[in-house]
Amino acid sequence: MRLLIISDTHLPKRARDLPPQVWAQVERADAVIHAGDWCVPGALDALEERAARVVGVYGNNDGPELRERLPEVARETLGGVRFAVVHETGQAPGREKRCAERFPDTDVLVFGHSHIPWDTSAGSGLRLLNPGSPTDRRRQPHHTYMTVEAADGVLAGVRLHRIGSA
């Protein structure tokens, strides 16, 4: 399975829409994982209309309507890989240990909130991925998103993409 991972899109506050580069990835993906901070229900609606499948959670900037439609924690097995998705994981120091304790039955934890791309593994083998943001880079040098492949229980081809480059 080809997966697109995005977070912190903050539509329409930080951008009117997702960048064309991200929409192109949506069209190619078997599933899109969104780690919260959509900001408006229309952002979820648009993604659900164009994506083959959406796995998403609400973030701290998402109001009651999005919180009614999305969970705080999503768990899905995609390509045999056990994913959990949350918006916030707390401060960077100790993140791997905290998350491994909180998600012991998970292969990959996708999170957002910081807008800082992240790819590490806990001692337990849990992989932690944060795609950054395709629309609000904050203090990061680039707007970003991730793509991954999941098949037969194996995560492969984890790639961080910069908006504006291939």
Image (cartoon, helix red, strand yellow):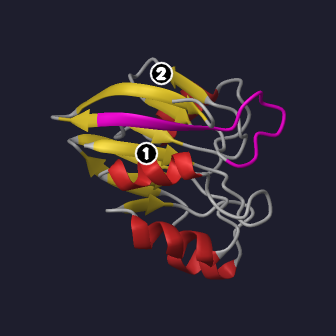
Give the residue at x 63% y 82%: 65
> Hey, which residue is sitting farthest left in the picture?
152
* Residue bearing mark 1: 4
- Whether 146 is among the magenta residues is yes
* The residue stretch that appears in magenta: 135-149
* Residue bearing mark 2: 121
| Dot 2 amino acid type | Ser
Q: Nearer the viewer, residue 5 or 162?
A: 162
Percent of width and height locating residue 1: 25, 43
Q: Badge 2, how many Cα within 10 Å: few under 14, some, many 20+?
A: some
Percent of width and height locating residue 137: 76, 39
Q: Secondary structure at mark 1?
A: strand
> Hey, which residue is sitting farthest right in the picture?
139
- Of badges 2 and 1, nearer the viewer stands 1
Q: Nearer the viewer, residue 102 or 145?
A: 145
Q: CA distance from mark 2 to mark 1?
A: 19 Å
Residue 71 as seen in the image, left or right of residue 91:
left
Q: Is residue 100 above or below residue 66?
A: above
Give the residue at x 68% y 73%: 40
Give the residue at x 50% y 36%: 146
